[in-house]
């Protein structure tokens, strides 16, 4: 299982100080994906994260601006699970406009769109030439409340839905993942797509 060490930083200055994880891949394609990077750090209150998704101007579907429109758009994704039963697990899909599709799920693909994250959460997104950047934070207390922070370990999946075409609400995606889940068809909603975040702080044990 892949691991990412999340440093403990109480006085954050620049994202450039945080080691980026860049080994994203197309698990179901033979070509190389556009560069995607992920960074995270934490203090004793929150987990902070940053995605940088490189590519042409992203395709984003906007009609009524409600959160399910994220499904038809370019986006980055972060999932959290308690265990391999995936009963439940928690999903956050974030588009380049900063819209968040957050939901609770149960294996297999039972989605509760009405679910709300129990703690404070903040997300921001900006587009820059040839990329978009998503930053955000989660309260650590919410991870503890949901039973998904175990000691200093979070089991997480990191993904990107690269939207290569958008005609009305018909989107074509190429699926990018931190981990190859070894499934025949594109699928992130399986235990094998998750890795581990190791939070670097003995006080969390």
Image: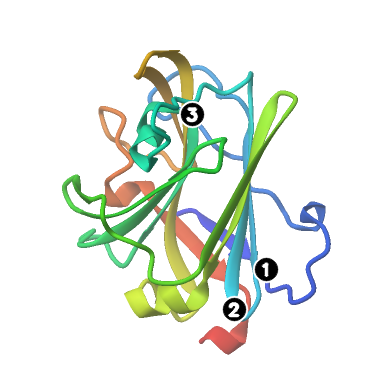
Q: Quadrant of residue 61?
A: top left
Q: Quadrant of residue 180?
A: top left
Q: Camera-side residue: 23 or 122? A: 122
Is 138 positioned to the left or the right of 82 in the image?
A: right
Is 17 positioned to the left or the right of 23 in the image?
A: right
Residue depicted at 38% across the width and 64% down the height: 117
Q: First in sequence, mark 3 or 1: give its number.
A: 1
Q: Tag 3's secondary structure?
A: loop
Q: First in sequence, mark 2 or 3: give its number.
A: 2
Residue depicted at 54% across the width and 37% down the height: 24
Q: Position of residue 76 (x, y in %)?
A: 50, 40
Q: Residue furthest front?
A: 64
Residue depicted at 38% across the width and 42% down the height: 67
Gap in angstroms between the C-alphas marked 3 and 1: 29 Å
Gap in angstroms between the C-alphas marked 1 and 2: 13 Å
Which mark, residue 7? 1
Gap in angstroms between the C-alphas marked 2 and 3: 30 Å
Q: Tag 1's secondary structure?
A: loop
Q: Position of residue 187 (x, y in %)?
A: 29, 36
Q: Using a 10 Å C-alpha cutoff, classify the residue at mark 3 as few (fewer than 14 neighbours), some (14 to 19) or many (20 or more).
A: many
Residue depicted at 62% across the width and 20% down the height: 57
Residue at numbered disc 3: 74
Q: Quadrant of residue 105?
A: bottom left
């Amino acid at each position: 299982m892949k691991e990412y060490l999340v440093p403990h930083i109480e006085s954050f200055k620049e994202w450039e100080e945080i080691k980026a994880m860049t080994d994203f891949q197309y698990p179901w394609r033979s070509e190389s994906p556009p560069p995607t990077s992920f960074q995270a750090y934490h203090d004793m209150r929150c987990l902070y994260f940053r995605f940088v998704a490189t590519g042409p101007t992203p395709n984003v579907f906007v009609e009524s601006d409600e959160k399910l429109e994220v499904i038809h758009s370019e986006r980055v994704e972060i999932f959290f699970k308690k265990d391999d039963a995936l009963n439940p697990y928690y999903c956050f899909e974030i588009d380049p406009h900063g819209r968040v599709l957050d939901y609770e799920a149960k294996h297999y693909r039972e989605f509760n769109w009405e679910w709300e994250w129990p703690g404070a959460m903040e997300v921001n997104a900006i587009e820059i030439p040839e990329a978009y950047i998503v930053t955000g934070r989660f309260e650590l207390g919410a991870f503890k409340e949901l039973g998904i922070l175990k000691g200093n370990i979070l089991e997480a999946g990191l993904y990107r839905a690269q939207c290569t075409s958008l005609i009305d609400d018909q989107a074509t995606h190429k699926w990018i993942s931190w981990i190859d889940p070894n499934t025949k068809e594109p699928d992130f909603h399986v235990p094998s797509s998750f890795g581990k975040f190791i939070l670097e702080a003995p006080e969390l044990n």
